[in-house]
């Protein structure tokens, strides 16, 4: 997948994340989902559902443990789109 | 702090509770007086949060069966069935459970939690796919995690959402395991089982139903949602617990797949834990007989459930969507809900406090569970205490 497609996914994911967190939080690739955005497990599940619907993918929950940053999340979404 | 650092949020939450002068997750029962009452902090409290649906914990026949088994077989098995042997009662209970459901095979586990861990983590391996309802019990989530399989969560009780996720799986869907619950423990709502069975016919997946809160509650003979919806033959695995309607502790799985019997040799949760004690097995066998012939108990349970549900609706509370013996009352903020719980408790009524993330959608709940053992007057007392609460 090209860099442009990564950027498109990032932009969509960022919009979704902004709906779930304090808008004053600046979200970039290195933002950490738990430590920086203070998301609890329930919120993370809701975000995953939104992302699944947006990209028409199913995101296995077992992949979540390896995701720390927004970039990790976007790369995993990219992988699920390709699968 | 070391390893304990991760528990600092819990330490903080406990300090906040201490400021309110309550400890809702650590209630000490000084004396249990009956299935519906206990002495707590020196006074009698009406219990409305025990999952003791049929009220069998004090049934004299169950107590006598447990006493007799203890006298003749001892207090415990002191090990697993693999290492220490199967007692006659273990085998008899499995045969009786299989006969109760009209299934070929049954396995008894040491708890309901362990039944889910053992079944899910043994049936599936990395590379398999499990689809679970978003509101699934922790034992289902943990069993899935232990299996290493891909875990896909669908929106609670939303068959259309499950359909969408199965469709995305393509050919893999026929090898997937879908897990749902008969009655969900927090909101008390039933799974849309008929719709999910229709999806099973479309996609060919394997289906497991956890009847922990619906055994003894739903169905003409108390066999749960699978009986109520008349789809016993469409479900691959039924998992359940002895700790609610059957008034003891333990878990089980029944199936018409004879290969289920092989699970016991591969399930670490079965092989490496002590088997249920003779007293437990004996009281469960007795309770199962009462449950199977317990139309009157179920009628009383449902009369009480409707009485409480309708009464709370009349008082203006927002409740879970389905009137069942699990009655979930939506409250306001976490702080308001804590204070309401405290008020009920001080007025002599014990219900379950459910705070996020245990409660769905970030809500806070006061969860009641109704028993056949509650009297009409006791249900009226619960309603009267709720009527004095400040509604959200």
Image (cartoon, rainbow, N blue to C red):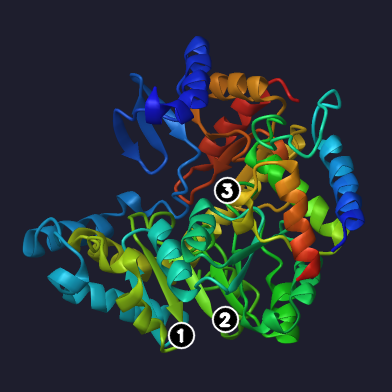
Report the mark closest to the observer, 2 or 3. Answer: 2
Provide residue B239's location: percent of width, then percent of height.
47, 68
Kindly check if marks 1 and 2 are in contact, taking CB atoms under 8 A apart as contact: yes
How far is disc 1 from disc 3 in space, using C-alphas?
30 Å
Q: Quadrant of residue A82?
A: bottom right
Residue at coordinates 15% horizontally, 73% vertically from top-left?
Answer: B85
Residue at coordinates 49% horizontally, 64% vertically from top-left?
Answer: B215
Read off the residue under disc 1.
B102
How far is disc 1 from disc 2 in space, using C-alphas?
9 Å
Name the secondary structure under disc 1. loop
Name the secondary structure under disc 3. helix
Apparent side of residue B271 relative to residue B54 in the rendered image (left or right): left
Does label 1 or label 3 sit earlier along the sequence?
A: 1
- B172 versus A28 height, above or below: below
Q: Which mark is residue B232?
A: 2
Q: Nearer the viewer, residue B142 or B202?
A: B142
Q: In the current view of this chain or complex, which residue is farthest to the front?
A: A3
């Amino acid at each position: 997948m090209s860099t442009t497609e990564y950027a498109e996914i990032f932009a969509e994911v960022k919009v979704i994340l902004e709906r779930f967190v304090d808008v004053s939080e600046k979200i970039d690739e290195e933002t950490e989902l738990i430590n920086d955005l203070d998301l609890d497990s329930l919120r993370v599940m809701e975000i995953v559902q939104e992302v699944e619907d947006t990209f028409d993918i199913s995101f296995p929950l077992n992949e979540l443990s390896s995701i720390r940053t927004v970039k990790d999340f976007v790369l995993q979404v990219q992988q699920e789109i390709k699968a | 702090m070391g390893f304990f650092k991760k528990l600092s949020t819990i330490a903080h939450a406990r300090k906040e509770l201490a400021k309110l002068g309550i400890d809702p997750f650590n209630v000490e029962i000084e004396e249990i007086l009956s299935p519906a009452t206990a002495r707590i902090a020196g006074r009698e409290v009406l219990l409305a949060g025990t999952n003791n649906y049929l009220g069998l914990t004090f049934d004299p026949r169950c107590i006598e069966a447990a006493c007799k088994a203890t006298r003749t077989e001892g207090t415990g098995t002191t090990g697993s069935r693999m290492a220490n042997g199967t007692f006659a009662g273990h085998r008899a209970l499995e045969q009786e459970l299989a006969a109760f459901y009209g299934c070929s095979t049954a396995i008894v586990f040491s708890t309901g939690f362990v039944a889910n861990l053992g079944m899910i983590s043994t049936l599936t391996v990395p590379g398999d796919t499990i689809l679970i309802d978003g509101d699934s019990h922790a034992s289902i989530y943990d069993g899935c995690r232990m299996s290493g399989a891909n875990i896909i969560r669908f929106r609670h009780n939303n068959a259309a959402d499950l359909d969408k996720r199965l469709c995305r799986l393509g050919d893999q869907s026929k090898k997937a395991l879908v897990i749902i619950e008969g009655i969900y423990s927090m909101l008390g709502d039933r799974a849309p089982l008929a719709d999910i069975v229709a999806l099973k016919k479309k996609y060919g997946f394997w289906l497991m139903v956890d009847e922990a809160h619906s055994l003894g509650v739903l169905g003409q003979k108390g066999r749960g949602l699978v009986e109520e919806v008349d789809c016993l033959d469409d479900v691959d695995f039924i998992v359940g617990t002895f700790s609610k309607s059957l008034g003891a502790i333990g878990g089980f799985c029944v199936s018409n797949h004879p290969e289920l019997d092989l699970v016991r040799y591969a399930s670490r949760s079965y092989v490496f834990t002590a088997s249920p004690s003779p007293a437990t097995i004996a009281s469960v066998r007795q309770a199962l007989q009462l449950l199977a012939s317990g139309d009157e108990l179920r009628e009383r349970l449902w009369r009480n459930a409707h009485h409480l549900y309708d009464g709370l609706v009349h008082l203006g509370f927002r409740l879970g969507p389905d009137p069942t013996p699990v009655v979930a009352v939506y409250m306001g903020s976490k702080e308001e809900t804590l204070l309401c719980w405290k008020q009920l408790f001080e007025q002599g009524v014990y219900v379950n406090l459910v705070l996020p993330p245990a409660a769905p959608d970030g809500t806070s709940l006061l969860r009641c569970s109704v028993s056949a053992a509650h009297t009409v007057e006791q249900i009226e007392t619960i309603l009267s205490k709720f009527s004095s609460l400040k509604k959200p």
